[in-house]
Amino acid sequence: MAPARMVSFIKKHAAECDICLADPDLQEEIEKITEIVLPESKIPKAVRMQQEQEELEKREAENTANEIDVADDESDLLNNTDPNI
């Protein structure tokens, strides 16, 4: 199987397989395999752009979740009436 086709097969399978979907480390492993098997110069431009967009969305979601956690912590501190804090 050609490297690009293999990567495509892995990603498609992982997106549909219940066992693969339950593995929290699988996406990271797929990215590592992709980097080894399919050098940047061989990745089609459209795929690279899609990967970059997905990575950006992932980072934005993580940042939003972190901001919510900080806001909750600050709210807890402001609403706390315990004089020992």
Image (cartoon, helix red, strand yellow):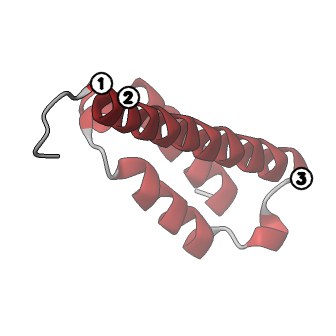
69 relative position to 34: left or right: left
Mark found first going from the N terminus, 3 or 1: 3
In the rendered image, the vertical position of residue 17 relative to residue 27, given as above or below: above
**Left or right, residue 29 beside residue 31:** left
Cα separation, mark 1 vs mark 2, equals 6 Å
Residue 71 visible, this angle = yes
Task: Say which residue appears at 64% left-offset and 40% top-offset.
Answer: 60
Instruction: Mark 1 and mark 2 in contact? Answer it, CB < 8 Å.
Output: yes
Q: Earlier in the sequence, mark 2 or mark 3?
A: 3
Nearer mark to the viewer, of 2 and 3: 2
Tag 3 and tag 1, C-beta contact below 8 Å: no
Residue at the spot x=34%, y=37% of the render? 73
- Identify which amino acid the numbered label 2 is placed on: Ser
Cα gap from disc 2 to disc 3, whole angstroms: 45 Å
Q: Nearer the viewer, mark 3 or mark 1?
A: 1
Label 2 neighbourhood size at 10 Å, few (<14), some (14-19), many (20+)? few
Q: Secondary structure at mark 2?
A: helix
Can you identify the residue that label 2 sits on? 75
The image position of residue 53, as x and y in percent, is 76, 42
- What residue sits right under mark 3 in the picture? 45
The kind of secondary structure element at disc 1 is helix
What residue sits right under mark 1 in the picture? 79
